[in-house]
Amino acid sequence: MPSSTVMPAAIKAGRKSVLVSGASFAGLATAYWLNRLGHNVTIVETASELRRGGTPVDIEGETIEILSRMGLANAVRAKALPPRGFEFKDADDATLGSIGIGNEPEAPERYEIHRDDLLDILSAAVKDEVEILFGQSIVELDEGRDGVSVSLSNGDRRDYALVFGCDGNRSNTRNLVFGESEQFVYFMGGYFFLKVVPHIWLLPANMSQVFSVPGRMAMLNGYEDRTDIGFGFRTIGEIDYNYRDRAQQRRLIHDQFDGLGWKVPAMLDSMDGDDDFYFDRINQIRMTCWSRGRVTLVGDAGYCVSPLAGFGGSMAIIGAGRLADALERYPDDHAAAFRHYETELRPFVEEVQERAATNGLAMMFPADETELAERDRKLLAGEMDM
């Protein structure tokens, strides 16, 4: 893959040089804070440009506070999507229950923003401040007493004081530093498909609808200019499939959903149009330690909470902010900073992961008739929230 470089306005003398792997939310937010703390920052990104596409991101709670500290909260508010209701449907399209529609109690401040808009906001915040090497990746890390010698895929070898793995669920950094990544994968017992249709289709704008039968779920998210088509299904164990074989992945969805009612037949027809979709197992990353030596992980690379949490983008920004707080507290002791970062953040990560593995699965992917009936009972009683 050809590489390109975005250079900062100047490399400042006397600063430590640090490396960030990955140019998504975790990487850009981490780079922002490292630059603000007085480091020369380089980002390496395997893609030839920023990775675009994907579902909108929820921004709430501590994430808003951190974005405010970064001076970016108002930019996020300016791009916030209209409030979106959530309806749970039966096979005849009757509404079993809803969330976010009607006279619910006033909710805390919360926004939803298109992923690309948040990416642009974070990217603009580090423009001209950090070096970005596109089309490159780390191939080797050798830690010494005073730093880490890093070999890149283009043959360059550079020295850095610290390295930050912000490269997602299938983190290359995690694999290089901590060993085979599969040992840290917690499989949640299912698979998820997502396709974006660039127009409003099958439901009103600013509405989500979910249809569930035991072990299977079909979902539509309607926005003002697009519709997300989602399918999910539960399995006892993992499926052996080729992640590059799109035709095989479509067959897996057809095997699970052919013959179901509601809007599923039209959704399946739309799925068959092209290979531009996402399909993957539903999993979390669970590690006993996020740091080793001069390397630490941020966001999905160290503690993916799964799409069911609806909190991955926020967790990346929170992780970067908490890491910055720790580095500021211990500016000359990276080991103490990394310990503080993990000690302070881990309880929150584990709480979000547990909520996704229990409530999230039960709400979106009821496993059997009993779990489905309990979900519907909670909907009717108004006991469910997102």
Image (spheres, helix red, strand yellow):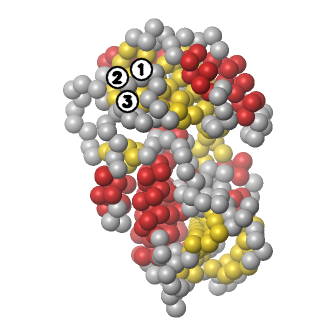
For marks 2 and 3, the one nearer the N-term is 2
Q: Quadrant of residue 179?
A: bottom right
Looking at the rendered structure, the secondary structure element under dot 3 is loop
Q: Which of the two residues, 237 or 36, is positioned nearer the viewer here?
A: 36
x, y percent for residue 269? 61, 21
Q: Which residue lies at the image location 65% right of the left edge and 60% below the top edge?
A: 48
Number of numbered callouts drawn? 3
Q: Could you say which quadrant of the image residue 7 lies in?
A: bottom right
Circle 3: residue type: Ala
Which label sits in the foreground, 2 or 3? 3
Amino acid type, callout 2: Ser
Q: What number is the disc on residue 205? A: 3
- Residue at (47, 48) in percent of width and height: 115
Q: Secondary structure at mark 1?
A: strand
Tell me how far mark 2 sits from mark 3, CA to CA: 16 Å
Q: Name the N-terminal-most of marks 2 and 1.
A: 1
Residue identified by numbered label 2? 98
Look at the numbered discs 2 and 1 and tell me whether their residues touch, using CB distance below 8 Å. Answer: yes
The residue lying furthest to the bottom in this view is: 13
**Is disc 3 surrounded by few (<14), some (14 to 19) or many (20+) residues within 10 Å?**
some
Q: Is residue 295 above or below residue 190?
A: below
The alpha-carbon separation of the residues under discs 3 and 1 comes to 16 Å
